[in-house]
Amino acid sequence: MFYLSRIEHTFRVPPSLLNLPIEEAIKGELEKLFLDKVIADLGLCVSVYDIKSIEGGFIFPSDGAATYTVVFRLIMFRPFVGEIIAAKVKESNATGLRLSIGFFDDIYIPAHLFPKPSSFKPDPNKKDKGTWEWEYDEEPYIIDGIDEIKFRVHNVSYPPIPIEQPKEAKPFAPMVITFLCMSSSVSLLHMLGPKGSIDEDGLGPVSWWVDAEETKES
Amino acid sequence: MKILEANAGALTNYEVVDFLRSKGAANDSTRVLAQVSPSEYKVYDYLVQTAACNQTREHINDFVDKCKIYGLAKAEVLNIINIRPTSIIDIYTIVEEGETRFGDETRFGEVSKELAELVEKTLPPPPTDPESEAGINEGKEETENEEHNVETKGEEQTKAGNDDGKVETVVGELMDTS
């Protein structure tokens, strides 16, 4: 989930920071540069972990500031494919679900990755909104926005910055996580007991698997 | 910008919380004084609601040692520590292809059960929020407790001093189980 990444970067430290100790000044500049930003293929930068080395301090002709080459490590948020994450529902509409884990909101479950058969029940009061239901044994399991839901990461993508964006398009997101097969930890999750067998690969809604198993045994 | 090493080690949620706490992140009124940026606080606020909140280095080392015998992949161990699954079925989703790796289904079932018990024993339960616990959330893994940090803040800060810089070694050294 969180990784360290070692990066080298050459940048200018403005003279206004000369009164600070060099490490502090550089750390501040690094935080300004990287914090809360997505680096393609590395993920979302959470924090500057440490500074390994500071070299240079060269002042280029006609520049009033020193330029340093710094090697440092960042804490990156980068989920791996197959990881299980618990998140909360943020939006629910006909195209799927959008989830949030507090500091990161670009998490989607597209409609085709829902367990089958799932259906979308539009909410008459709110435009475009509604709830998703999974049907099992003629019993609907509703995904409401209250409970945390666990998901398996299906894909993490870093879309390129669009040159021109249509007006009605969603705001650009530099990093998008797609999730697969959810197990909503709704009230269904209560089981535990001697483990029998699971006849499928277990890939899928955890709690619902439990449920399926119990039904079979009884 | 040059990426020297994209993956210089994985961190558990606990290590990130610990790092942020060492920077002065907390949930009380001193948070505005700390050198912690708003984006870091967002991460912190998320993480203190998860199982990582009450974990300590000892818990994690202990767990990593004890689950070595199962031969889990590094990522799986990491995921188990972060999620703290206490039911067999949660283990099932995290451990991939368990049936083939552990022989057959029944063996995998046993392993999952042992793992679930081990998790329950070695990793501390996540904080529970007295208000939200009453309803259907009973026994659920991740509920929040904002108050916890206020109490423990003092000791966290004293700890922060000597922990700094050691954080990355935990995962690197101990999790070469794969």
Image (tube, coloured by chain):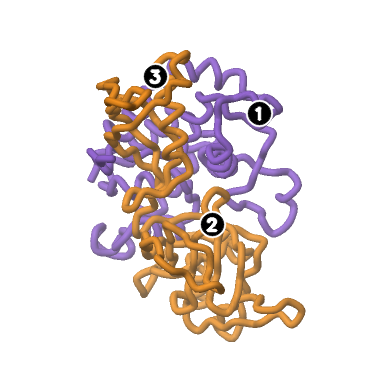
Q: Identify the residue at image location x=43%, y=61%.
A: A177
Q: Which chain is orange?
A: A
- Number of callouts: 3
Report which colour depicts chain B: purple
The image shows residue A209 at horizontal and vertical percentages of: 47, 70
Q: Identify the residue at image location x=43%, y=69%.
A: A164
Badge 1 marks a residue whose secondary structure is: helix
The amino acid pointed to by label 1 is Val
Q: Which mark is residue A23?
A: 3
Quarter assignment of residue A58: top left
Gap between marks 1 and 2, in whole Å? 24 Å
Comparing B49 with B138, the one in front is B49
Give the residue number, with chain letter if any, for mark 1.
B32
The image shows residue B102 at horizontal and vertical percentages of: 26, 57
Badge 2 marks a residue whose secondary structure is: loop
Comparing B106 with A74, the one in front is A74
Badge 3 marks a residue whose secondary structure is: helix
Q: Which mark is residue A105?
A: 2
Q: Identify the residue at image location x=72%, y=50%.
A: B132
Q: Chain for mark 3?
A: A
Left or right of residue B51: residue A22: left
Comparing A197 with B178, the one in front is B178
Left or right of residue A125: residue B158: left
